[in-house]
Image: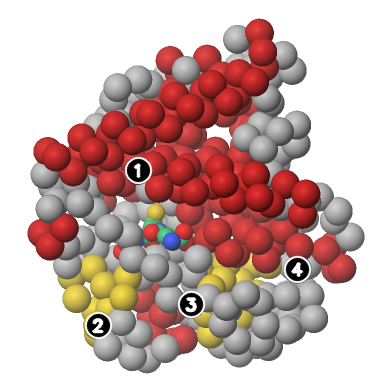
Amino acid sequence: MGLLVDGAWKDQWYDTKSSGGRFQRKQSAFRNWVTADGGAGSSGEAGFKAEAGRYHLYVSLACPWAHRTMILRKLKGLEDLISVSVVHWHMGEEGWTFEEGPGATGDPLNGARLMHQIYTKADPLYSGRVTVPVLWDKQKGTIVSNESSEIIRMFNSAFDGLTGSNLDFYPAALREEIDAINAPIYGHVNNGVYKCGFATSQEAYEEAFDALFATLDDIEARLGRQRYLAGDVVTEADWRLFTTLLRFDPVYYGHFKCNQRRLADYPNLWNYTRELYQMPGVAETVDLFHIKQHYYGSHESVNPTRIVPKGPAIDFSAPHNRERPRAA
Ligand SMILES: N[C@@H](CCC(=O)N[C@@H](CS)C(=O)NCC(=O)O)C(=O)O
């Protein structure tokens, strides 16, 4: 684990000393947008027009942020238009690598050995963390974006003219509702589990833990009133939450000490997670081997023995009752 400083790699764990033991996630650096006509998006530069075969996605199958982009790529019918490289699950001293292994593809596109070489190819003097997902432009030879929340919005609409897809996970009429629910879920759940797991003071851990479970309690109640987070239809808010929920019992409950309750102890959340998992195409984006190997094997300060637990036994394919959300 490390980061780039003026284009040079430094092996360094997250700094929590200056923040009372709190893990603080840095802002993503590349914030351009692919758009239907190549015009600029809400940040960054113009010049990234949606075209078949032009863009490439770098992901880890372990990573919940990258997982969102893989789900949207699948559901929006973008698999033939946007190619993918999958990094090796182990993130060690050199960060993410293209070492080969089951489910890891290497980097046939750029021939890189390490993910940080993709960042310095885009910006030789880049300083910052080397994260996935990364959306790469083959034509310009640079990174379009390394911010998953924005990549999924590009996937949701920019390529519709090419794919003919009319599925909309960020419909105009629900945007306010989606943005309002995304905010606490990002802060207390998606990032909240990391704040628990990477805390280096008791106080920081407990603060994150309490906020996480208070938010899960709120969502549990909401899912007793309605089928999905923003109402009757699946939106990006559901996919953003899903990738964290999927990892909850296998990883966050134990490895990140998020153990007030298991996900399986929340009737609505657990049924909802299985419903989303069972939607066509979604299970194919899930790789529990990469997920468990990555977390337990890569975070040496959290799990020094790197032993990967065999359990728990979970059946994401078991029937759910979400046709009748109120009944739970
Ligand atoms: N804000 C980013 C976060 C991505 C992120 O933190 N990815 C993790 C993997 S789950 C990563 O690559 N971490 C490497 C590091 O922090 O050095 C996004 O949502 O795209």
Residue lying at 18% horizontally and 43% vertically, measured from the top left:
204
CA separation in Å, label 4 and label 1: 30 Å
Residue beneath disc 3 = 30
Q: Amino acid at mark 2?
A: Val
Q: Residues within 10 Å of mark 1 (few under 14, many from 20)?
A: many
SS for dot 4: loop
Q: Earlier in the sequence, mark 1 or mark 3?
A: 3
Q: Residues within 10 Å of mark 3 (few under 14, many from 20)?
A: some
Residue lying at 12% horizontally and 53% vertically, measured from the top left:
20
Q: Residues within 10 Å of mark 2 (few under 14, many from 20)?
A: few
Report x, y in % for residue 313: 42, 19
Ligand 1 within 8 Å of disc 4? The answer is no
* CB atoms of marks 4 and 3 within 8 Å: no
Up-down relation of residue 165 to residue 195 (above or below): below
CA separation in Å, label 2 and label 3: 16 Å
SS for dot 2: strand
Report x, y in % for residue 232: 75, 31
CA separation in Å, label 2 and label 1: 27 Å
As rendered, which of 119 and 187 lies closer to the eye? 187
Residue beneath disc 1 = 192
Residue 5 image label: 2
* CB atoms of marks 4 and 1 within 8 Å: no
* CB atoms of marks 1 and 3 within 8 Å: no
CA separation in Å, label 1 and label 3: 23 Å
Q: Earlier in the sequence, mark 4 or mark 1?
A: 4
Residue beneath disc 4 = 158
Does residue 95 appear to the left or right of 228 in the view shown? left
